[in-house]
Every structure is written in C-alpha cells, then in structure tokens.
C-alpha cells in the first residue's frame, strides 16, 4: 500500500506545476499586450496619422471618383454602389497593413536599442513571446480600424457594420490584422537597420496595396487588359484579407479567402519564429551586438 501511494504522488505534484506554467505564460502575454497598449496611449500622433491617411483617400480620392467609377452589381453587392462604399473595406485593410508594417519598425528599433534582448531572454518559449507581440499588434490594428469605420460613418459612408454580418466582419478584421502583423514580424527578421526600413516598406506596402482589390475589383483589372496586374492581385494575400472583410460585411460567402488568409498567417508566423531562432537567421545578430 505504501508503494502505491508513492507511485500516485508525482502526477498530483505535476498538476500544480503545469498550472503554474500556463499562468506564467498568460501573465507574459498580458504584460506584453498591456505594454503595447500603454505605449500606444502615449503616442496620440500615431492614432491621428493612422486615421488621416485613409480618411484623405475617402474624402478626396473617393469623392472625386464617386460617380465616375461606378461599381456594377457584382458580389457581394445587390445593387449599384458609390465608390466610397466600395473603397471603405480596402481603406480598413490599409489601416491594418500600415500598422502591421509599423510593428516591424518597432521590432527593429527595440532590437537596436537593446530592449529586444530583455524580451527574448525572458523565461518563456520564444515562439510564445513572438505570438504575444503579434497579438498586441493585431489588437492595436483592430482598434485603429474600428476608429476609422466610426469616423467614416460620420462622413456619410454607409457600411452595414450593425447587420448580421458585422460579427463575421469583426472576425475577418482580426484574422487580417494577425496575418499582416505576422508579415511585419517576418520582415523584422531581415531588416537589419532602421535606415533600410523605408526602402523595404516601398517594396512591400505599396505593391501589396495597389495590386489588390482595395481600390478596384478584379474584373476591372482584367477588363482593362492589365493581365499581369490582375494575376498579381489574385495571388496577393492582402487581396483576400480585403475581400473577406468586404464579403463578410454583406453576409456573403467569401469563398477561399478565409483559408488563404489563415494559411498565410501560419506561414508568416512560422517563418518569423524560424528567423528568430538563435541557431538560424536571428542568431547572426549576436555578432553585431544584438540579442543573444
């Protein structure tokens, strides 16, 4: 009987240890998210700049083409719509895209200033620390996107955000924010200095945005004869993030868009974790004084 009691004791002691590990991981997640939210709350200019950019497109660009560039009755719309209604989901995607890329700038800055050393040497799995950073980035992206939607509604852009598709659109918004945040995380692996950030962004942000359905539907590209732009837009993951949001708003089936967004999210995040592995891509930074 005594031997049986000894055998049963280790599982009883392992349960609190496992529980403590989970709680420690959740505390790390909470600390990173709260830190990013606090830092964002101290940067009011960041929110203003995040809203001014898409609002300029909505108030100036969309207004100029409001009746010139009519959108035909195609999915997900049941009637003709003005151009500002069509472009609004693309501008929401713009907010997610720019904030996701800005997160990579923050990672590069933290790495140069040495703050990344403290983060990556915390007693938690590195992939969990990167996931926590990704969650914080996505949360900030979603909050900024919702703020833009609210201001756009005040300007008269009619979006069915309070319809049955509103919850689905919020899910699409979160997944798109995670995907673009993971892309920014991946880019931060290969951006070595802040001076190289602007050039890198020109080869990421503008091609992703302009070669997508954010500004014009795919059939318009094909109809105009721009076949190579049409093909690039089809394979652009940002296109599928925007289309998922657009179709979700109107309660329509987004097709393969959710699977493509989630697949790209998984690929970008796994590559980022691989790049931040000290034994692989990120390990070379130790030679330049970066995190160990």
Image (cartoon, rainbow, N blue to C red):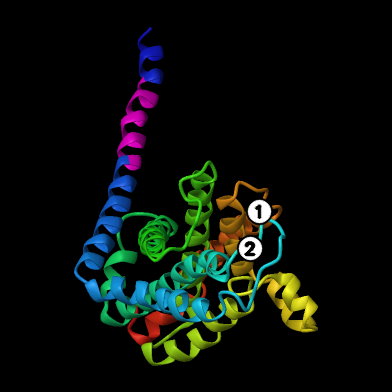
Q: Does the rendering let one see residue 278?
A: no
Q: How far across and how far down the image is residue 188, in percent?
A: 44, 76
Q: Quadrant of residue 15?
A: top left
The secondary element bearing badge 1 is classed as helix
Can residue 121 be seen at all in this image of the molecule? yes
Residue drawn at (58%, 66%), measured in percent from left and top? 86
Q: Position of residue 117 (x, y in %)?
A: 30, 71
Q: Mark 1 to mark 2: distance in Å?
A: 9 Å
Any mark on residue 240, and which? Answer: 2
> Farthest residue toward the front?
67
Q: Which mark is residue 259?
A: 1
Where residue 100 sits, quadrant-wise, is: bottom left
- Badge 1 vs badge 2, beta-carbon distance below 8 Å: no
Residue positioned most to the left? 42
Is residue 15 located in the magenta-colored stretch of the structure?
yes
Task: Look at 36% across and 31% down and name the residue there.
Answer: 14
The front one of 156 and 13 is 156
Please identify, in this view, whether the residue under mark 1 or under mark 2 is nearer the observer.
2
């Amino acid at each position: 009987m005594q031997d049986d009691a000894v055998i049963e004791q280790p599982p009883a002691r392992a349960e609190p240890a496992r529980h403590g590990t989970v709680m420690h991981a959740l505390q790390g997640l909470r600390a990173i998210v709260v830190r990013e939210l606090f830092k964002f709350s101290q940067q009011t200019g960041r929110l203003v700049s995040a809203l001014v950019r898409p609002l300029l497109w909505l108030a100036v660009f969309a207004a100029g083409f409001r009746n010139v560039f009519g959108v035909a009755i195609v999915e997900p719309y049941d009637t003709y719509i003005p151009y500002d209604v069509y472009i609004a989901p693309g501008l929401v995607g713009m907010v997610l895209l720019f904030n996701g890329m800005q997160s990579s700038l923050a990672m590069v800055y933290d790495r140069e200033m040495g703050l990344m050393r403290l983060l990556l040497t915390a007693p938690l799995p590195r992939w969990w620390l990167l996931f926590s950073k990704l969650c914080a980035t996505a949360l900030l992206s979603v909050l900024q996107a919702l703020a833009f939607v609210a201001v756009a509604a005040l300007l008269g852009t009619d979006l069915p955000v309070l319809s049955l598709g509103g919850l689905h659109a919020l899910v699409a918004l979160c997944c798109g924010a995670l995907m673009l945040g993971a892309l920014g995380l991946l880019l931060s692996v290969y951006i070595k200095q802040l001076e190289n950030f602007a050039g890198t962004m020109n080869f990421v942000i503008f091609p992703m945005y302009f070669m997508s359905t954010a500004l014009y539907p795919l059939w318009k590209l094909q109809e105009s004869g721009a076949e190579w732009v049409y093909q690039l837009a089809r394979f652009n993951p940002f296109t599928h993030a925007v289309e998922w949001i657009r179709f979700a708003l109107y309660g329509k089936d987004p097709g393969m868009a959710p699977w493509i967004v989630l697949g790209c999210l998984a690929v970008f995040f796994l590559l980022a974790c691989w790049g931040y592995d000290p034994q692989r891509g990120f390990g070379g930074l130790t030679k330049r004084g970066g995190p160990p």
